[in-house]
Amino acid sequence: MKIAFINPRFPQLKVLHPVKTLMQENRSLTKVKIEKIQEQLGFDFRSSFLVEKENPISVALLSLASFLEKKGYKCNYFQQSLYSSKRWKKTLKKIAKHYEVICISSFTFNFPLAVHEIVKPLKRLNKNILLIGGGYHMSFCDEESISKGFDIIVRGEGEKTLWEVVKCIENSKEDKLAKIPNISYKFNNRIRRNKRCLYSLDLERLPSPAYHLLPRQLRKDPYLCLFTSRGCPYKCKYCAEGNFWQNFRRKSINKIVEDVSVFLSQCKTRVIFFGDSTFNLDEKYALTILRVLRKEFPDVYFAANMRVSLMNSFVVKEFFKNNLRIIFAGIESADPLILKAVKRNETPRSMLQGIINCSNFPFIVNLSYIVGLPGENKVSINTTKRFIDQTYKYFTTPNLFSTVRVFVPYPGTPIFEQPNLFGLKILHKNWEEYHRYTKPVFKLNRFKRIKIWEAFIDLWKFVLKKEKEQLQ
């Protein structure tokens, strides 16, 4: 049985004029800043790493493909963004002819496009082809996904469940689907949602992602990443990760070394990005990873998502010593009431101290802020402005970058599931508008939609002003 994994392209964003201008200005400033600090980095660094990626590679699909390859199935990976519209239509004809099973994962805002440009065309070309969906959005919107043309939705962690589904189809035992947990499918014109079961996959036994399936031009992509764990012990109300993975697990040091070795044998890059939500959750574990990897791969540098509140002076020094060079950290808001409302479990004071500690070394630090979280108002926006102003005062070189986004209540998050509890009203479910650079798809009880949008524009302009000052 041949299985195709398809990563849908991103739609062309319908951004309003002020945002489009700000995005262009942000890209230009980022490029100039990187050029200024390139020499101190010690390696070739592309500014695109710090700019919102438009069509990222799906490491999740590559992980599923490698798992099924290990079970003996022939798999292939298709990145739709590499194809022109005309060429993609021709490719779909070949896929419909040569593959029995198609696996697709999408984000929320490109789900409609995936349906229009992949799901429906494939069904027209081959009505017997099996379309399986998965990932965050379809796991939490499974019934709608099936109504749009998918045959089966794998909810949550996918490797074992997908394998069981494929075995059923391969052996023509579709009636056995009822016994597979964590899937939704149509049977006798009715949608069945099988019970949810906690699969605790042993990460030690999972093969490394199938990077060998990537076209050569994608193996140099700076956004290729590895994961040292799955899940997140934090329960932030705006995040679906805890609900999706259910439990937190991490890999052994030996397994991580193995994954990095496979990665470097397939991909031409000197920067590895750890995609875990919080790489420094356990500082001893994180330090051990970096020390071992530096010894094994001395010419490789690392980037990671961090909680800056956990970055004390000793940890920061050791991280830099062991080739960590790029830090991504979500600040979200500097208003303590907002942080408490969304269960962020950090304080502005602890975050600022962590940023100060990072400023003592030439890291690239990228801080992100969200406008429109529950409790947002003019006062909280001004509080965040003051916090941003403080952060730039501690960096004597242009190593600090800031990103501003609009809050999006994604499916699967507690805020999406119970908006009333957070003083929020979701206005519609036009998924293509669920993007961090388009107008809010919600309103707050005490902060209208237009006010949220105006605050977002205002805060982004303030950040760009600080970026320019940093260059002077």
Image (cartoon, grey):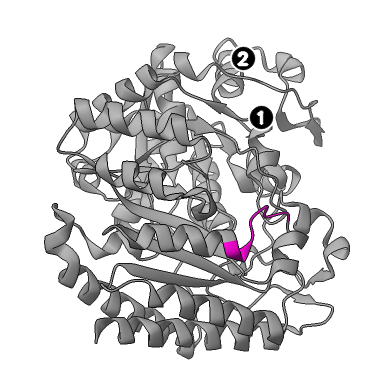
Please state which amino acid type lies under the numbered disc 1. Answer: Asn
Q: Which residue is mark 2?
A: 168
Q: Residue at x 15, y 60 (%)?
A: 40
Give the alpha-carbon distance from disc 1 to disc 2, as whole Å.
Answer: 27 Å
Q: Residue at x 64, y 45 (%)?
A: 138
Which dot, 1 or 2, sits closer to the camera? 1
- The percent coordinates of residue 216 (x first, y second) are 19, 41
Rate crowding at label 1 as few (under 14), some (14 to 19) or many (20 or more) other CA atoms within 10 Å: some
Report the magenta stretch's main SS: loop
- The percent coordinates of residue 200 (x first, y second) are 63, 20
Secondary structure beneath disc 1? loop
Q: Which residue is mark 1?
A: 247
What are the residue bounds of the magenta stretch?
343-349
For residue 290, side relative to residue 331 (left or right): left
Q: Earlier in the sequence, mark 1 or mark 2?
A: 2
Q: Is residue 177 in view?
A: yes
